[in-house]
Amino acid sequence: MMYEIALKGKPIRLAVLDYGLFEVHAGPRTIGICGFAVQTDAGEVVLIDTGFPEKYTVDAEAATAEDGLGSFGRVLKITPENTPESQLAKLGLSKADVTLMIQSHTHIDHVGHMGGFPGVPILIAAAERDLPRPMYWSGKQAMEWPARDYHLVTQDVTLGPGFQVLLCPGHAPGQLAFMIQLPQTGWVMLTSDAISRAAEIDEGFAGSWEVPLAIHHGARLMELAQQRDALVIFGHSPQQWTTLRKAPEWFT
């Protein structure tokens, strides 16, 4: 395993990747499953998260039963179009263009294609990589760790100018969030599941792996976003998802 990595360039554009739709029974609420692609002025492409496993594009009902996901919710739409490869293609990119993968954490809707980019290093929190297997879902831990060079995050780190990785345990042991500065948009805060939706703040982050930590880091992220007048993109906001600009469009 490796512990340090740096980007050669600074971010010039960011795209939201559409990995499908899921209905959470609580509410109920319909949430988008998202990832991100960030391109730098040095030609680097950083892929953040990879959505559900491939089997969900083939038979979502059977995959849901196999993983015991039905107690939490149901898949509304995950098609071959909602894979990293297809989403990158919308941007004129291919899997071969990806130079770094980042795992925000290791729940099932974020790690499905983690093993699909051979040779590409993975940035991940040490607290996640230290687990015997990725968290996946409900204790099943059905995936193995792919053989990769892992760059382990143990504190907030700056990958390069305008690209900060923030360690925000709470939702998960090694939850990451991101602050990215773009030429025109300015700062963009990607909360991932550190704040899945704005309402989660008022709800006290109920159901998190460690609620006090989730509350602490949720407040920290929102304070930082306010200080920098950042555009905040939440991890799974029903209200935001329907209007959010997605691939093939870019934030620049």
Image: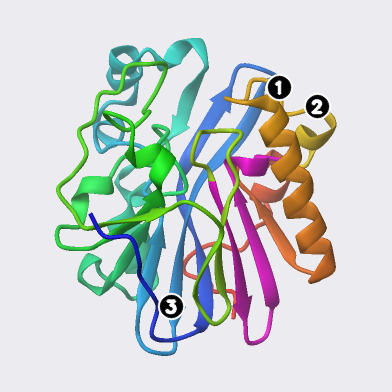
Residue 63 location (% of width, % of height): 29, 21
Q: CA distance from mark 2 to mark 1?
A: 6 Å
Front residue of 41 and 79? 41
Lateral position of residue 169 relative to residue 248, left or right: right
**CB-based contact (under 8 Å), mark 1 and mark 3:** no
The amino acid on which the numbered mark 3 sits, given as a three-letter code, is: Gln
Residue 161 among magenta residues = no
Mark 3 and mark 2: span between their CA atoms? 35 Å
Which one is closest to the eye, mark 1 or mark 3? 1
> Looking at the picture, how far across and down is residue 106, in whole percent?
40, 37
- Nearer the observer, 192 or 18: 192
Does the CB distance between marks 2 and 1 fall below 8 Å?
yes
Q: Mark 2 = which residue? A: 203
- In the structure shown, which secondary structural element does the residue marked by tag 1 occupy? loop
Horizontal side, residue 215 vs residue 98: left or right:
right
- Could you say which quadrant of the image residue 88 lies in? bottom left
| Residue 44 horizontal side relative to residue 227, left or right | left
Q: For mark 3, give the secondary structure.
A: strand
* Span of residues in magenta: 176-197
Q: Residues within 10 Å of mark 1 (few under 14, many from 20)?
A: some
Q: Residue at x 24, y 32 (%)?
A: 55
Q: Earlier in the sequence, mark 3 or mark 2?
A: 3
The residue singled out by tag 1 in the image is: 206
The amino acid type, in three-letter code, at marker 2 is Glu
Residue appearing at x 79%, y 36% in the figure: 201
Q: Residue at x 18, y 54 (%)?
A: 148
Q: Which residue is mark 3?
A: 39
Q: Main secondary structure of the magenta part?
A: strand
Q: Secondary structure at mark 2?
A: loop
